Amino acid sequence: MSKVRVLFVCLGNICRSPMAEAVFRARVAQRGLADRIEVASTGTGHWNLGQPPHRGTQRILQERGYSFDGMRAKKLPASEILTYDYIVAMDRSNVEDLVAMGVPRERIRMLTDYVPGKEGQDVPDPYYTGNFEEVYELVDAGVDRLLDEIASSPNPSASTTSR
């Protein structure tokens, strides 16, 4: 059985998507699903390539015991993005950037689609707002429901790649 591949996407890959990647990876491990699920993150912009997560993201992750060792900002090409079963964007601008790169809109989900009462809303970019706590709360809620969906699906990769 091949692994289900999950990709979190934000603008610079230093704030929101690496936070989601770190939290989701830990939750996957806690549920004993690391042999079934692979997780990564990417940005749609190139400004931060090679940089570690933003110090605000690092602080939030450290305070809560999440590892971000080895994480560096990257921008994957559409051809690689399309190899993921779940492509999870942080905001509508990320969705539009992905579509412009050639990723079909129907393959993209918003993280807030997994947060009851917040469906379709943007995860605010803390690079501009400074509110890393708000981002963590949305990530915390969203990744659990995403993981529930993946874990309960008998063949998750088959159901998402055909969308």
Image (tube, rainbow, N blue to C red):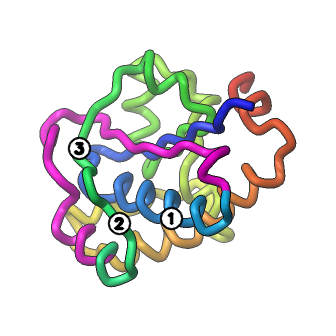
Task: Tally the numbered discs.
Answer: 3
Q: Which residue is mark 3?
A: 73
Residue type of the residue flagged with mark 2: Ser
Image height of 152 relative to 4, above or below? below
Q: Nearer the viewer, residue 28 or 139?
A: 28
Q: CA distance from mark 2 to mark 1?
A: 8 Å
* x and y, in percent, of residue 44 in the image: 31, 35
The secondary structure type at the circle numbered 2 is: loop
Residue type of the residue flagged with mark 1: Ala
* x and y, in percent, of residue 97 in the image: 37, 31
Q: Which residues are magenta?
A: 33-60
* x and y, in percent, of residue 13 in the image: 28, 47
Q: Is residue 127 located in the magenta-colored stretch of the structure?
A: no
**Residue density around tag 2, few if under 14, some if 14–19, many if 20 or more, within 10 Å:** some
Where does the C terminus fall, quadrant-wise? top right
Residue type of the residue flagged with mark 3: Ala
The residue that appears at 35% across and 39% down in the rendered structure is: 42
Q: Which residue is mark 1?
A: 26
Q: Mark 3 or 1 closer to N-term? A: 1
Q: Nearer the viewer, residue 133 or 22?
A: 22
Q: CA distance from mark 3 to mark 1?
A: 19 Å
Q: Does the CB distance between marks 2 and 1 fall below 8 Å? A: yes
The residue that appears at 31% across and 39% down in the rendered structure is: 43
Q: Does the CB distance between marks 3 and 2 fall below 8 Å? A: no
Where does the N terminus fall, quadrant-wise? top right
